[in-house]
Image (cartoon, grey):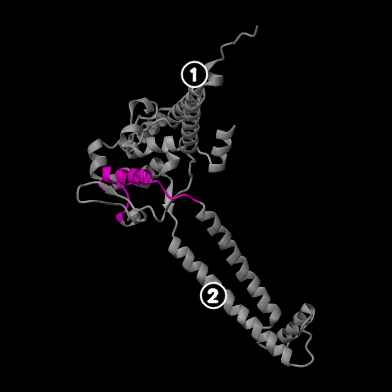
Amino acid sequence: MRRGTKASGSSRHPQTSDQDLESQSSAQDSRPPQPSAQDIEEEPWRYVGYRGYSKFIASDDDFFILRRFASLNIRVALSLQDEIVELERELEKLDDKYTRQGGIDNGSFREDREREGQWYREGEDHRGRDELLSLIHEKLRRYNKFLLQQSALRNYDRAPEKDVKSLFRWHRNHDFKAICTEEQEYLNSTDKTPDGKIKVDTTDLICVVPKDKPPLRRIIDSSLFLRTLKLWEDKKRNVPEDPGLADVSYYSEKRMDRFVTAAIVILGMAMLVAPLWVLQALGDLKKKLVVITVFVSVFLLVVSFAMVAKPFEALAATAA
């Protein structure tokens, strides 16, 4: 068994001078004082700002909402397309010109490169087919890359209205002063109706981290009463460690998902087992067929609307 030995203070613990203690004390005194709740309320742009807003958005993937810029992206795509069309027409004109001229081989890239190299050496300012194809290649590369980006971007789901409202409420809790008003305009489609309710247009807003939730979970999320039940409350996270998160309440996603899973399993078991007990108590064949038809129909509806299943998957599960 190894035993520890005491080391002498001179060898392990260097002496601290009075000057070092004074410098440490002055460094502690130079730290800015913690802002009070009144300070944060009066100057959220100073004490909350983008640091608090970023922490709030990072606290849940549902809040990572950005603009799609659909109109701008389409306009840029049309502009890139038009640039390529102009180059394509220029190439066709060169083909027609070289076809009419004699002594030009229109079936050789190498001859085009050699001829244009000679023009360059002689200082002639001509744009031949080789140079034009290089320019078209660069334009097409940008165009194709942009199209692939747009194809991926179009697959992002539209941001749920409730999540956009959460961002709006965060700004409202800070009197819309935590960040610059003009820089909140990516949510400018969010407004209030005359009766004070929040009206949201999510046409151009996307959720960067979409979640595939079953319909039963969506029902919980769509109801303010259901999604804010004490049953889901995450007390460990509901401790405001940052001024920007002081008015934020957290609810456990795992707890909600477990509840939805348990509800679906119990409902599915009931739909499978209950008909057996009903059928054994019935003697009439027609009544048995009615019971089977009703339970099969209800089970199909449960599979279709309570779970994330495609129509053919729901039919396969019902048939099985």
Kind of residue at badge 1: Trp
Query: Mark 2, residues whose alpha carbon is within 10 Å: few (<14), some, or many (≥20)?
Result: few
| Residue 1 horizontal/vertical position (percent) | 65, 6
The span from disc 1 to disc 2 (Cα, nearest Å) is 70 Å
Q: Residues within 10 Å of mark 1 (few under 14, many from 20)?
A: few
The percent position of residue 225, horizontal first and vertical second, equals 31, 33
Q: Residue at x 53, y 59 (%)?
A: 150
Quadrant in which residue 129 is drawn: bottom right
Measuring 65% from the left and 71% from the top, which residue is drawn there?
137
Task: Tell me the magenta residue range.
Answer: 156-181
Residue type for callout 2: Asp
Front-most of residues 202 and 19: 202
Q: Residue furthest left?
A: 195
Residue 32's disc is none
Whether residue 254 is situated above or below residue 129 in the rendered picture: above
Q: Is residue 98 magenta?
A: no
Left or right for 100, reference 242: right
Q: Which mark is residue 82?
A: 2
